[in-house]
Image (spheres, rainbow, N blue to C red):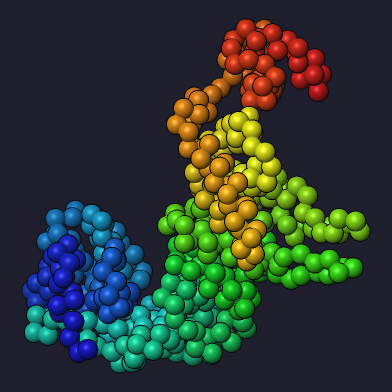
Amino acid sequence: MSNISELLLNNPDYSKILKKATIVSAELDIPAYLVGGSVRDKLIGKDNSKDIDLMVEKNSELFSSELAKKLNVKTLIKFEKFYTYRIPYPDIEIEIAAARKETYNPDSRKPNTVTLTSIKEDLYRRDFTINAIAASLMKDNFGEIYDPLNGISDLNKGLLITPKDPDTTFSDDPLRMLRAIRFATTLNFKLDDKITSSIKKQAERIKIISYERITTEIIKILSSEKPSIGFYKLKETNLLKYIFPEIDIMPGVEVINGHSHKDVFIHTLEVVDNAAKLSNKMEIRFAALVHDIAKPPTKKYYKNKGWTFHGHEEIGRRMLKKVARRMKLPNELRDYLMTLTKLHLRPIALAKKNISDKAVRRVMYEAGEYIDDLMILCRADITTKDPKKIRKYMSNFERVEALMQDVKLRDEMRAFKSPVDGHIIMKAFDLKEGKLVGLFKKHIEDAILDCKINNDYESAYKYMFEIKDKILTN
């Protein structure tokens, strides 16, 4: 394919920007190209890209300023040291960079020196040949492909190859190792053998990358059609032990006296893939990845019982506080993962025995707004291959789901709270706002959920005095 002008113009919002870029290129006599993932996605038929990456020869600041004016955008975000500029256009991120060469320090992925150069040299410095394809935005040959590294051939083969020796490519910017795994997963491409070998050798260098960038790549892998591909490759290339050590230690099966257990790593990735089939919601897939995070540290063998993982759901919940800090996760996502990890066994336990309204109410109360996601996670957690077990389990599980769909019950649980509020508790026991007040409220709410007392003010107030010594003397 030598010209993709039709592909570039088939999206009105996208084509408007590119046409303006063509006008600026002609007016300023500055060669301009669409490059990188923007071209790759067009070539493989992904027309949902929210990014436009432009590369120009000569003056990138002047070009960027003029393009921003033509798009009626007053703000221009400048990265002058790297000859790069960003136009915050509504719904589409536009980045313009000058054709350049770079050198790097060993302890940073940021370029140490940046030198202006030609389009060919610029494409040669990029991460993979499939991202080193350019399309002209010049008036005379708009849409003409420039592909000096045969990126289209590699795209057609479904193969990831680096323009330079991969040892150099990954040493310059170790984040590219993670990007290789991400592209292999999201595009379902094969890694060139030299890439796999190079990542194994240099995996430890990923430690110089910020966790914000690492987490972004992990989330993109989780958002793919089959996330397990990425995590198996992360394990194979030794990257997993540096970016997610709690998952890295999961593989393996021990056998004692004929008793064995599931390989937690394989099971976890089956659950992640199941979740991906059931929902596009990345957060559910993340919960699937971490729901058994505490199984390795809680694994014990008992002669009469075999292997157990007692308390792994609660210990996993606590572990996620540390994981979230390290990975720089937003507080809302942290709390979501902690809640689903803590509760992931509860609906399953209900499905294995007689279901009581009380037990269902308690799970719904504790899960709160996450109850639907919890049920999807539990469904994904069914990885047995025995059809009899699946039929038996699912019939009970579907009864639990049916109860949880009861609108009246949902409304009750959403509105549920202690009939005695914090102000009454503080006044009754001369307390200041704090942990003790919270304990009183929790004990009262638990008593109502367990049907020990009625859900009314009088019963709750009386119960508050019955438990005061237990709470105030601890």
Q: In this image, 18 relative to 168: left or right?
A: left
Q: In this image, 471 relative to 186: left or right?
A: right
Q: Residue at x 52, y 37 (%)?
A: 404
Asked if residue 396 shows in the view, the reply is yes
Image coordinates for residue 454, horizontal then vertical, percent: 63, 15
Q: Residue at x 20, y 89 (%)?
A: 2
Q: Quadrant of the C terminus?
A: top right
Q: From the viewer's side, name the closer residue of 300 and 164.
A: 300
Q: In this image, 395 relative to 32: left or right?
A: right
Residue 443 against residue 224 in the figure, above or below: above
Q: Residue at x 26, y 69 (%)?
A: 47
Q: In this image, 57 relative to 314: left or right?
A: left
Q: Residue at x 42, y 57 (%)?
A: 280
- Give the total number of marks visible in the rendering: 0
Q: Toward which corner of the image does residue 343 lie, by quadrant?
A: top right
Q: Toward which corner of the image does residue 103 lie, by quadrant?
A: bottom left
Q: Residue furthest right?
A: 303
Residue 355 against residue 4 in the figure, above or below: above
Q: Quadrant of the N terminus?
A: bottom left
Asked if residue 117 shows in the view, the reply is no
Image coordinates for residue 408, horizontal then vertical, percent: 46, 27
Q: From the viewer's side, name the closer residue of 458 and 63.
A: 458
Residue 428 against residue 69 in the figure, above or below: above
Image coordinates for residue 251, horizontal then vertical, percent: 70, 69
Q: Toward which corner of the image does residue 71 lie, by quadrant?
A: bottom left
Residue 62 against residue 441 in the figure, above or below: below
Image coordinates for residue 328, horizontal then vertical, percent: 54, 53
Q: From the viewer's side, name the closer residue of 87 and 47.
A: 47
